[in-house]
Image: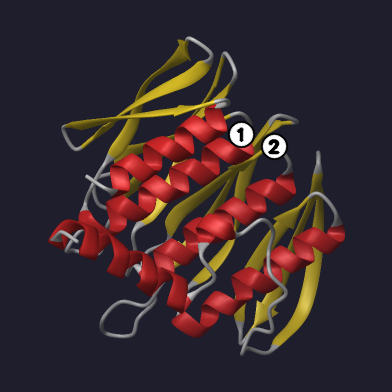
Amino acid sequence: MSQLKQTVSIASLCLATLFASPFTMAANPIVTPQVTCGSASSQVLQGGFVVSLTCDGKRISGIGTTMDTATSNANAIASLLQYDVRCSYSSYSGGPGAFVVSFGCSRPNSDGTTGRSSHVGGVGTTLTDAGNNIFGFAQLYAASNGYRCDSSETKVIPGGYITNFGCGYPSTSGGTGRASTIGGIGSTATDAAQNTLGFAELGASIDRKCSIVSAGIVGAAFEVRVSCSGRSVTGYGSTLTSAGRDALLQAQSL
């Protein structure tokens, strides 16, 4: 195994050890956060709910299509308080097909003071899917010492969606830092955003920035071309979701 492949493997292993792996997360797991949560409130949105909890004196939120899935998402977000990361609901847009959600997440500065809030985004076909996606990006934010990704663009294309996120580490002064576009693709907005999360892990671990260049049909298969820090990979599959996954595998092996 090359040194680069070892780096990818180690990065993936570290993230999977610290949290459940975002690659295999179909829904928020049932978690028991090692925190104490008290008062709760809820907000009705078009397409679902926001649930906010006060845990160890800190306000956190979750979002979902039903009150139950929003509460499950809030419990998952609350578990990140163990790692000094707190995230709360900021905004959402879109509707059936592609909900786009943004949370404000922060972690302490090196001197223990509250750090500047960074926007962390999530995209999904439903608000539950968007909540699952934002939890995955919040996990990455926590595990990587502040690598944050916020949704910048969701495009409908023949056969599916492309979701672009602006991702980057904070600046040395504690600011939000410069963001680079990380993209993913899939047959649904949920699959595209999950694909983006996989590419974002490469950005966080080895500074490999990948974006979708083109997608189309070649013969009987979908073909997806991806540019990763000046190098190109091509994925193939019977759907845009499977082609996007194949492209991610190729990018992990560069």
Instruction: Where is residue 254? Give x, y as percent.
Output: 22, 44
In this view, 33 is above or below 104: below
Identify residue type, mark 1: Ala
Instruction: Where is residue 36? Give x, y as percent.
Output: 68, 90
| Residue situated in front as seen by the camera: 96 or 101 | 96
In this view, 149 is above or below 28: above
Please report the residue visible at 76 percent of the width from the left and 60 percent of the height from the top.
Answer: 70
Quarter of the image containing the N terminus?
bottom left
Is 26 left, or right, of 9 in this rendering?
right
Q: Which residue is mark 1?
A: 189
Is 134 left, or right, of 28 in this rendering?
left
Q: Earlier in the sequence, mark 2 or mark 1?
A: 2
Instruction: Where is residue 38? Give x, y as percent.
Output: 75, 84
Task: For mark 2, give the secondary structure.
Answer: loop
Callout 1: 10 Å neighbours few (<14), some, many (20+)? many
Please report the residue visible at 43 percent of the width from the left and 20 percent of the height from the top.
Answer: 223
Q: Which residue is mark 2?
A: 125
Callout 2: 10 Å neighbours few (<14), some, many (20+)? many
Identify residue type, mark 2: Thr
The label shown at residue 100 is none
Asked where in the image residue 173 lies, by quadrant, the reply is: bottom left
Task: For mark 1, give the secondary structure.
Answer: helix
